Amino acid sequence: MAGTGVPDAAPPPSQPPPAPRFTPARLRRARWSVAAVFLVHGSVTGGFATRVPWIQDHAHLGAGQLGLALAFPAIGASLAMPLAGRISHRLGARTALRLLLALWTLSLALPALSPNLYGLCGALLAYGATSGMADVAMNALGVETEDRLGKPIMSGLHGMWSVGALLGSAAGTAAAHAATDARIHLAVAAVVSTVLGAIACQGVLDLRSTPGEHPPPRFALPPKSALVIGAVGFCAVFAEGASLDWSAVYLRDALGTDAGLAAASTTAFSCTMAVARLAGDRVVARFGPVRTVRASGLLATAGGVLIVSARHPAMALAGFALIGLGIAVVVPLAFAAAGRSGPAPSQAIAGVATITYTSGLIAPSAIGSIAQATSLTGSFVLVTVLACGLVLGAGVLRVPGRGATGRDCVPAAGLERS
């Protein structure tokens, strides 16, 4: 105090003054901005998928060579995702997301430029690495935004990703129908997506590391909590990959359905999953993540039972729709739980993302191998068993002693409001 001979008290250097809280209007803007980021990310995936046949012909690849090349996005993502936390620590969440999302959207142009298998594998390695790092960064920001809002938003964010994938695939389908050179289509899509992504990133929360905080390791094994949460995500993504890639084949080969009706199974699955994700936040807010995932697992299990016991295409169609409905909110909730499971949210999210990417990679080939050894019906018995795993494992998504969204509304490990 001045004039008393007692020095003024100063805050310890290790305790910086708290940053001001975000206003409700700022948080609402951040919510819709990060939703737009998810939409842009999904649109890149949807656009690329539609031009894979063109890329295969351009690079003169057989089916086996294409299958090998398509494994490289998951490899690149798994290797690079742990780096996302370190980049966010160094640059801040907003700048890191802006950079990583731009690298991801621009990488969309690379596969169509590849003249052979080796070039395509390298392009897809970069494509997957940038996708995975942007994925971790945007999910970490989604969890932070959800915590500050005090209500669930992760399911809706992933619903926006599904909407983006549908928009990207629709544009790609139109380009393919018009016989547009994929090098031109994907280059234009890359530029447009990059611009839209940069605009979307302007409104996300700018979270920064606290002074003196040690950066996360470049590479580290995911924490045990992420492994357990990732196991739940594994079950959901395995069912998703199996249903997307094999539903039409199942109806055609197991039930003798014509090609048009068989293709409708994929549409039914995708639509129910997108709708459920967009509506899922209200359900999670009312019933909580654990009860929601248990009920979702029951729906997915019922869908699997319908599929394996189907004697008519309508039963199988209903089964695939129920699986889509049942697994829709699981992965968003797994990312949310990982972001709150310990002192290193980016590392935990990267761990869960690696597990789910791996599940998506092995599911289609695993279903094919089991079908060859037994039958397609036998392969979907495994999907049904994994759906039961959602019911049994839902409890790991609970964070004891936390708020309505699973956590008190405070900054996550090392991040402060700015």
Image (cartoon, rainbow, N blue to C red):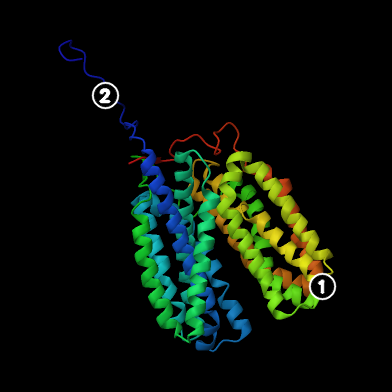
Q: Is residue 26 above or below residue 197?
A: above
Residue shown at 75% from the left, 77% from the top: 252
Judging from the image, what secondary structure is the residue with disc 1 in?
loop
Residue shown at 37% from the left, 45% from the top: 207
Of 230 and 224, which appears nearest the observer?
A: 230
Q: Is residue 6 above or below residue 294?
A: above
Label 2 near label 1: C-beta < 8 Å? no
Badge 1 or badge 2: first in the primary sequence: 2
Residue denoted by label 1? 375
- Mark 2 neighbour class, 10 Å CA radius: few under 14, some 14 to 19, many 20 or more: few
Image quadrant of residue 162?
Answer: bottom right
> Taking the image as drawn, is residue 221 in sight?
no
What is the quadrant of the C terminus in the image? top left
- Disc 1 from disc 2: Cα separation: 73 Å
- The disc labelled 1 sits on which kind of residue? Ser
Could you tell whether 355 is left or right of 157 in the image? right
| Percent of width and height locating residue 296 | 69, 50
Could you tell whether 383 is left or right of 38 in the image? right
Residue shown at 67% from the left, 42% from the top: 291
| Percent of width and height locating residue 258 | 74, 80
What is the quadrant of the N terminus in the image? top left
Q: Is residue 412 above or below residue 72?
A: above
- The disc labelled 2 sits on which kind of residue? Ala
Give the farthest residue toward the left. Answer: 3
Could you tell whether 377 is left or right of 77 in the image? right
| Percent of width and height locating residue 17 | 31, 31
Residue denoted by label 2? 10
Image quadrant of residue 194?
Answer: bottom left
Residue shown at 62% from the left, 52% from the top: 330
> Taking the image as drawn, is residue 239 in sight?
yes
Of 170 and 128, which appears nearest the observer?
A: 170
